[in-house]
């Protein structure tokens, strides 16, 4: 999938990985997490104590359906009081009696929110998120945006939600023909740059066509001159 891929991730980066379906976005995240092994090259987290946290597209499916919402969180932070747990769940749009629902009774969006809350509680300084906004409604997406903006670690995100990316990413990596192309700016910077690149390619094509026509014209003139001399 990747050829000569090279990417340096720095502390505090919020990198969005973009590319068409099948380009290898999720595979790249799996490689970072050690879930797959590269056939060539290596992935090095450097001398720092990097603790990754991973949210995959089907993360909600790993929740225990028999537990309640509040117990799911309590299991992650057993030292917290009920009030602290309910305050956290309130930020993830669980309120009043909904915190006592069984996971099995939750909607797909509620399960996704609960899975995010659970993951964000873990002591990770590198978040790797694969389509985290799937099944989230607008308030839940806004909550996640704020959580990522306040997060003091590093995040690498795959998402088809361009508005979400525009709100949280400070760098963009596009997977293009097996290469990782880095844009050192936010999503709007990326759009400006690819527009510039497209315009450059267009102008180069026009110049190449002009040169080709000019060469063809010169060849035609030479042939005419030869024909005249032959007479």
Image (tube, rainbow, N blue to C red):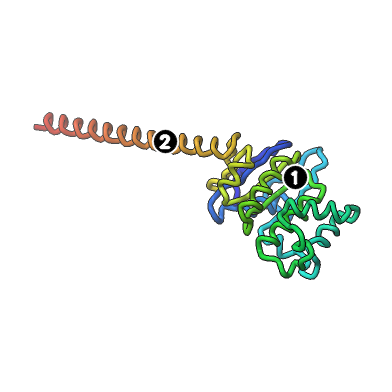
Q: Is residue 133 left or right of residue 118?
A: left
Residue closer to the observer: 112 or 38: 112
Question: Quadrant location of the C terminus?
Answer: top left
Q: Residue furthest right?
A: 79
Q: Residue furthest front?
A: 96
Q: Position of residue 206 (x, y in %)?
A: 34, 35
Mark toward the start of the polypeptide (2 vs 1): 1
Mark 1 Cα within 10 Å, few/some/many (few <14, many 20+)? many
Q: Which residue in the protein does label 2 denote?
A: 199
Mark 2 vs mark 1, foreground winner is: 1
Residue closer to the observer: 171 or 148: 148
Q: Position of residue 103 (x, y in %)?
A: 75, 66
* Residue under the image location 65 percent in, 50 percent down: 28
Q: Is residue 217 left or right of residue 44?
A: left
Q: Position of residue 176 (x, y in %)?
A: 54, 46
Q: CA distance from mark 2 to mark 1?
A: 36 Å
One can see residue 36 in this view = no
* Residue under the image location 81 percent in, 38 percent down: 47
- Residue 222's place in the image compared with 50, above or below, is above
Q: Which residue in the protein does label 1 denote?
A: 126
- Residue 98's place in the image compared with 178, above or below, is below
Q: Contact, CB < 8 Å: mark 2 with mark 1?
A: no
Total numbered labels placed on residues in the image: 2
Q: Secondary structure at mark 2?
A: helix
Residue closer to the observer: 115 or 200: 115
One can see residue 116 in this view = yes
Residue closer to the observer: 86 or 130: 86
* Residue under the image location 75 percent in, 39 percent down: 152
Q: Position of residue 180 (x, y in %)?
A: 59, 43
Mark 2 Cα within 10 Å, few/some/many (few <14, many 20+)? few
């Amino acid at each position: 999938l990747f050829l000569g891929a090279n990417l340096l991730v720095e502390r505090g980066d919020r990198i969005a990985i973009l590319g068409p379906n099948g380009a290898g976005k999720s595979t790249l995240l799996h490689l970072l997490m050690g879930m797959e092994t590269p056939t060539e090259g290596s992935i090095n987290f450097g001398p720092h104590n990097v603790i990754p946290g991973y949210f995959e597209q089907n993360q909600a499916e790993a929740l225990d359906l028999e537990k309640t919402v509040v117990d799911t969180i309590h299991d992650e932070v057993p030292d917290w009081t009920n009030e602290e747990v309910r305050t956290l769940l309130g930020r993830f749009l669980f309120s009043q009696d909904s915190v006592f629902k069984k996971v099995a009774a939750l909607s797909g969006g509620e399960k996704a929110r609960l899975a995010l809350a659970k993951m964000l509680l873990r002591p990770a300084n590198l978040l790797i998120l694969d389509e985290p906004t799937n099944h989230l409604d607008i308030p839940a997406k806004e909550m996640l945006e704020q959580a990522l903006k306040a997060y003091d670690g590093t995040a690498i995100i795959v998402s088809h939600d361009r508005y979400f990316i525009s709100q949280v990413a400070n760098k963009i990596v596009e997977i293009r023909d097996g290469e990782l192309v880095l844009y050192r700016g936010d999503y709007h910077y990326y759009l400006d740059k690819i527009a510039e690149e497209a315009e450059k390619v267009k102008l180069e094509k026009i110049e190449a066509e002009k040169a080709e026509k000019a060469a063809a014209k010169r060849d035609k003139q030479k042939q005419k001159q030869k024909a005249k001399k032959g007479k």
